[in-house]
Amino acid sequence: MNDRSRSTSVPALDCLTVTDQTSSSASRSNESSGNRADRLPKQWNPTDVESVLYQGWVDAGYFHADATSDRKPFSIVLPPPNVTGQLHMGHALDHTLMDSMARRKRMQGYEVLWLPGSDHAGIATQTKVEAMLKETEGKDRFDYGREEFVERVWEWKHKFGGVIQNQMRAIGDSVDWERERFTLDDGLSKAVQTIFKELFDRGLIYRAKRLVNWSPVLRTAISDIEVVYSDDEGELVTLRYGDVEGKGPHADVATTRVETMLGDVAVAVHPDDERYKDLVGTTLPHPFIEGRSMVVIADDYVDPEFGTGMVKITPAHDPNDFAMGQRHNLEMPEVIDETGHIANTGTQFDGLDRFEAREQIRLALEEQGRVLKRIHPYVHSVGHSERSKEAIEPRLSEQWWVKVDELAKMSGDAVREGDTVIHPASQEPRWFDWVDDMHDWCISRQLWWGHRIPIWYGPDGEIVCCGPDDEKPTGEGWHQENDVLDTWFSSALWPFSTMGWPEQSDELKKFYPTSVLVTGYDILFFWVARMMMFGTFADTITGSTLGSGESGTSADERNGRPQVPFTDVFLHGLVRDEHGRKMSKSLGNGIDPMDWVRDYGADALRFTLARGANPGTDLPIGEDSAQSSRNFATKLFNATKFALMNGAEVLGENEKQNFPAREALTDADRWILDKLEELRVLVDTHLDRYEFAVANEALYRFAWNEFCDWYLEIAKVQIPRDWDAATDAEKTRGQNTRLVLGRVLD
């Protein structure tokens, strides 16, 4: 047994249940066993006690971290849930594991900061408030104007934005509520403006017109993570450009989006396709756009074995076509506007909704004899906006971008050099796939709720970026950028903006970099990589205080590499139903964790999740799992009640020398203590490796089998029934058993 193991308290059941050993053991040791047992109810009903216990811990300040203490720091920042959100099983798993770590580290003597907060969730919140205003007042945001609408969103946030925080209290999260943060707090907003200006001044933020995922309902660009794909029924139409009879130059192309042909500027073939070699470089007239000719180009992207081996090119409305348009310097006419209607074509289709236009254009092409084939229905994958549910529209749009090459390299190097360790290691290849081949990041959103981009435009084309302390341009013709930043931009600063950066704070000195980031493997790229990019970048800013904290390592130790925002990344799997299916509303298999808290107790919810959690492995759960965990909690309650009724004693720190010598104990006493030590070493080992399932299974089997089924039964024999009639030897044996019972429970 090494020194670390010897000094480590048994994490045991406390770090996974709503029983805080650190706050209660001293007081319990001074109470009479009879009084303690009398205070316990006849049956275990968690709803009677959990909320009272929790509020008592908060009021006593047990979860508040002291940034000036001399204890070794341990810190976690809570992945900020959306302010609109409610606790789902993924959150419950996340929080259970983080709480397990935080409570265990407190028991081991660390100064623990578990910092909570929430994300303003730009699109989600604005969508929710707009829907509410439409329903209650029949108005949209444009009826209010920007300032008044934003004020209405703040009103909504103050009234309805705390649901998930109350649910976190219900499941026992030991977070430092005194340090709760929000991504639109003044301090966090200052951090956002600071890092934006630094990136802009170094040429790492720029403005460009590129293809983005566009939501016609929300009228904004959206990120890849906000696009949900489903198999939709549509039709595949093969149409002919050029000579309808096929006797002269012509091209037969297939499409599921006929309406985009209004933006076609070319037809592409593979350079080695002998069938079309003579066509390359020729032009074909557009069926509807007078004066537009479509050039036939050769490009390696085209698969000559697929379909006719010819592909229509619409650079402004398809990502692959956009790339070809750039390679071949093609025009990029935009034919679908921000609301999803046909525009700027000069045809009879202008003003039609894109789906109505799809039908009308196909009919017009049929009249010209250009529709060669229709496959209907044709099932294909279509991206939809997660929030507004409509099909997203790839659209050419002027946006703000982050140039990621340098940032991504620092993020990759941090893992390669071991400054940050990913658990499980099997996720490392995915990490390198992303950061080594990352595309520039679109950070602007056409919303009103969020961090407004700190760019000002002047009357003569001037562009000025202002930091938080800069004087903003004023005067006739000056105006600020209307767009706000992608929510992921501010949450990428979360590990250090929440601790006061760019100011030098006690929290940064003590707790940064954070010890571990806990999250699901599904957002490894969308959030984790971006935090790594901004964390390493912020440490390169002149005068930055990052990297100087007690949790960090010196620049010499890192050989000059920038400080990372977290030293460990623990990626858990996804919670699935008992059949291994993803939980979803459409399948009707979702489980509300608060239902389990009500029906089985927070302990049962948390133990179910912790018992099945291993790095990177999905976790199937069902009602039977919760019932089993509830039975386990009841078993522990009954065991504790028996022990207290029989005088079990927990010695305080100053009394531990009074624990009986090993030779004074019975074989059963020595056996259970030996099994307990084996368990402690095993649990420590596996929790250090983030192998929660293995650790908790060991706890379960020890508590149920060795302790409850064996030792408690032996203890009934070893503790005299009639103490007054017992011999001195029987009393000594009984008192020793009481102490062993107390130690094992503790």
Image (cartoon, rainbow, N blue to C red):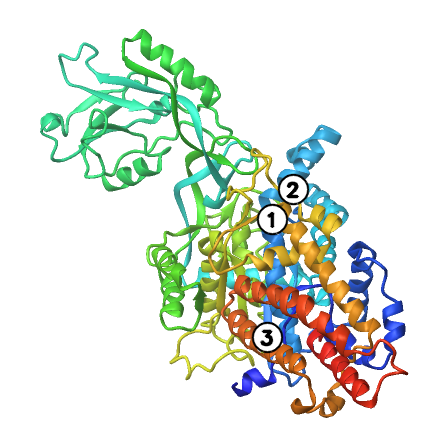
Q: Amino acid at mark 1?
A: Ala
Q: Amino acid at mark 2?
A: Arg
| Tag shown at residue 146 | 2
Circles 1 and 3, Cβ within 8 Å, touching? The answer is no
Label 2: few (<14), some or many (≥20) within 10 Å?
A: some
Label 1: few (<14), some or many (≥20) within 10 Å?
A: many
Foreground disc of the pair 1, 2: 1
| Tag shown at residue 436 | none
What is the quadrant of residue 25 in the picture? bottom right
Estimate the spatial distance between the alpha carbons at disc 1 and disc 2, rounded to whole Å: 17 Å
Picture residue at 51% right of the left edge, 32% below the top:
216
Q: Which residue is mark 1?
A: 121
Residue 405 position in % (x across, y down): 35, 59
First in sequence, mark 1 or 2: give its number: 1
Q: Which residue is mark 3?
A: 74
* 713 sits left or right of 245 in the view: right
* 729 sits left or right of 126 in the view: right
Estimate the spatial distance between the alpha carbons at disc 3 and disc 2, rounded to whole Å: 42 Å
Residue 175's place in the image compared with 107, above or below, is above
Disc 1, SS: loop
Residue 172's place in the image compared with 345, above or below, is below
Is residue 194 visible to the viewer in this orientation of the structure?
Answer: no
In the image, 45 versus 470, the foreground residue is 45
* 381 sits left or right of 52 in the view: left
Picture residue at 48% right of the left edge, 38% below the top:
228
